[in-house]
């Protein structure tokens, strides 16, 4: 454990003067800001609770799916390939550093990145609500739902990271895999076929997109939503997953894919 | 005599059907500099990588500090400093920041380790220059600093003078010699530059096509080197005849119209010169020659020399 912490500290030290990582955290503000600035329905709110709800749902439904997921895989390939690219793996192995532990430290860094991404988006939303002179009613619950979704997205990105490590190809291939995986998750996460599956061994439970949707959606207040949204809620509410169910899947998937990533990373030469 | 610090037994590395290193058995003695000499592609780097556990051998054993490397990597590698192939560091960090990362992993908390290591290779501590902006020589110096930072007992240095300017080469050579002489460190150094090995090493291993051809001390190698007299005269054939008929020297060999080689060290060179002059020959040079390490290298590898 101490060795992992030491490696994690080193991973942080390696980020110095690497704008990609910090810029990726900052992009979590893009969608909430964009929606607030350009969408008329995001400019007028009847209450603070409604403002919090609508702004946080942009973070959950757009930022997490369309920005966090690809950012996670792109950063993962950047972190995992950096030792090969800079020829530093031999120096690390001569310390000696345990290769699986090194891979896990990099995944830990991504875990913290996910949390930072969702937290940053949450705080930007809070600032927007406060900026409109509204009271941020219910913000903290949704803030922590956002953190939970960040963790789900991190776990959901691991299969894709595994694929990138397994193929051990260039960044371009990684980016192609990433965007394909992101698109699949987003489409499946909004598709009835997947979000109306019972909790169990099926794509609706195992894929991060549908799973996250079936978890966070129950925390959104849809009382002021359109009839279409209310109808959607009625249709999918029997398939909502509880927090223990959702995090059980996250833990199991993380354990499996972290082990696979560590194993493949270990077997690759330095 | 104490056990060797590094001992390999039948070390072999195969890539497909190709033997990169074949049945290599080297013995690096404590407190000495061992020079692994070979052409590019001879198997020096592969050998060093196997000694550090970076490449798994196809067969054979590696013992370091008397223990098998396999299974004891953590205790053994922490006592070794290494530089393998080109220097590898994080380009977005300065030299000091790069060393801080490795110092952190080695558990070296006191900044004096980094400061001393940088001082040894004449690089500034806490400089603002990023590794990506370093010259090749500076990169190589930083790699040497990394190798010595934790004060290891054994140094494994693969072509450490690559990229250094002549002054840098002399500095690094002096520093390596000093490390061995003053602190008793054991050093395994590889090079394809013969003069460097002959200036630095106490023991020499000659490797060619992955096979260790010779392993001897520098003194032993020097003793093996051939010695001979060489004369430059106006008529080499006549001079050879004179040596045979008048001084009973049968080992005279005419190498060109004006050059004569005599592989008999009993020859009185003064008497020979007098004989040539009395016979009306002009003598422009008379010398005792000794084969160089390069000549020896050519002989044992059966091929051309190296730099």
Image (cartoon, rainbow, N blue to C red):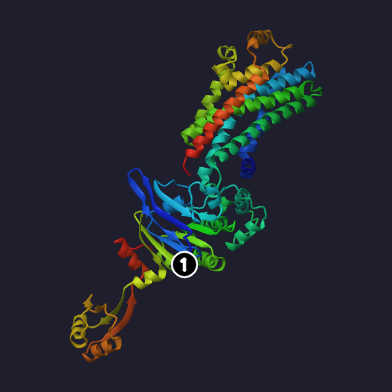
Q: Residue A176 in the image: x percent, y percent?
A: 50, 29
Quadrant of the rendered image containing residue B141: bottom right
For image coordinates 64% across by 23% down, the residue present is: A247
Q: Residue furthest front?
A: B1
* Total count of labels: 1
Q: Is residue A111 above or below residue B146?
A: above
Q: Residue B207 in the image: x percent, y percent?
A: 37, 58
Secondary structure of the residue carrying numbered label 1:
helix
Residue position for label 1:
B200
Horizontally, is B199 left or right of A205 in the view?
Answer: left
Q: Nearer the viewer, residue B114 or B210?
A: B210
Q: Residue furthest bottom?
A: B278
Q: Residue A24 in the image: x percent, y percent?
A: 63, 34
Q: Residue B231 in the image: x percent, y percent?
A: 27, 81
Q: Is residue A121 above or below residue A203?
A: below
**Quadrant in which the C terminus of chain B appears:** bottom left
Q: Specify the subunit that label 1 lies on.
A: B
Quadrant of the rendered image containing residue A35: top right
| Label 1: few (<14), some (14–19) or many (≥20) C-alpha neighbours in 10 Å | some
Q: Is residue A142 above or below residue B286?
A: above
Quadrant of the rendered image containing residue A194: top right
Q: Nearer the viewer, residue A224 or B307?
A: B307
Is residue A103 visible in the rendered structure shown here?
A: yes
Horizontally, is B187 left or right of A12 in the view?
Answer: left
Is residue B137 visible in the rendered structure shown here?
A: no
Q: Nearer the viewer, residue A40 or B109?
A: B109
């Amino acid at each position: 454990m101490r060795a992992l912490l030491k490696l994690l500290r080193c991973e942080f030290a390696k980020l110095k003067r690497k704008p990609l990582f910090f810029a990726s955290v900052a992009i979590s503000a893009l969608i909430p800001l964009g929606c607030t600035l350009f969408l008329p329905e995001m400019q007028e709110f009847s209450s603070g609770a409604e403002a919090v709800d609508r702004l946080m749902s942009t973070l959950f439904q757009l930022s997490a799916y369309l920005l966090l997921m690809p950012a996670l895989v792109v950063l993962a390939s950047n972190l995992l390939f950096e030792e090969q690219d800079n020829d530093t793996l031999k120096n690390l192995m001569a310390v000696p550093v345990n290769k699986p532990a090194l891979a896990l430290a990099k995944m830990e860094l991504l875990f913290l990145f996910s949390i930072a991404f969702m937290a940053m988006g949450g705080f930007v939303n809070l600032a927007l609500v406060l900026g409109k002179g509204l009271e941020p009613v219910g913000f903290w619950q949704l803030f922590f739902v956002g953190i939970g979704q960040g963790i789900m997205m991190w776990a959901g990105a691991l299969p894709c990271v595994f694929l990138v490590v397994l193929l051990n190809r260039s960044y371009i291939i990684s980016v192609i895999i990433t965007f394909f995986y992101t698109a699949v998750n987003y489409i499946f996460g909004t598709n009835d076929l997947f979000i109306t599956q019972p909790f169990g061994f099926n794509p609706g439970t195992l894929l991060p997109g549908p799973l996250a949707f079936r978890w966070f959606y129950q925390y959104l207040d849809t009382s002021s939503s359109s009839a279409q949204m209310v109808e959607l809620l009625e249709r999918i509410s029997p398939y909502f997953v509880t927090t223990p169910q959702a995090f059980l899947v996250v833990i199991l998937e993380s354990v499996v894919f972290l082990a696979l990533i560590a194993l493949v990373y270990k077997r690759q030469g330095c | 005599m104490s056990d060797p610090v590094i001992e390999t037994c039948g070390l072999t590395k195969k890539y497909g059907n190709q033997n990169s290193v074949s049945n290599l058995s080297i013995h690096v003695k404590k407190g000495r500099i061992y020079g692994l000499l070979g052409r590019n592609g001879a198997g020096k780097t592969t050998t060093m990588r196997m000694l550090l556990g970076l490449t798994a051998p196809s067969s054979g054993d590696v013992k370091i500090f008397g223990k098998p490397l396999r299974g004891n990597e953590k205790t053994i590698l922490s006592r070794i400093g290494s530089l393998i192939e080109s220097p590898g560091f994080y380009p977005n960090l300065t030299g000091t920041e790069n060393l801080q990362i490795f110092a952190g992993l080695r558990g070296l908390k006191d900044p004096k380790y980094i400061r001393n290591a940088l001082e040894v290779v004449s690089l500034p501590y806490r400089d603002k220059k990023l590794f990506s902006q370093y010259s090749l020589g500076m990169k190589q110096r930083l790699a040497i600093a990394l190798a010595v930072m934790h004060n290891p007992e054994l140094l494994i240095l693969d072509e450490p003078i690559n990229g250094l300017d002549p002054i840098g080469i002399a500095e690094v050579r002096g520093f390596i010699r000093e490390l061995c002489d003053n602190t008793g460190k054991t050093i395994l150094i590889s090079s394809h530059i013969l003069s460097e090995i002959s200036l630095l090493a106490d023991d020499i291993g000659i490797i060619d096509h992955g096979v260790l051809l010779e392993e001897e001390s520098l003194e032993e190698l020097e003793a093996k080197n051939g010695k001979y007299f060489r004369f430059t005269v106006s008529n080499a054939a006549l001079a050879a005849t004179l040596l045979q008929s008048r001084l009973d020297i049968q080992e005279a060999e005419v190498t060109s119209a004006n050059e004569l080689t005599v592989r008999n060290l009993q020859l009185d060179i003064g008497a020979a010169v007098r004989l040539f002059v009395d016979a009306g020959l002009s003598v422009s040079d008379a010398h005792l020659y000794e084969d160089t390490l390069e000549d020896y290298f050519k002989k044992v590898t059966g091929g051309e020399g190296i730099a």
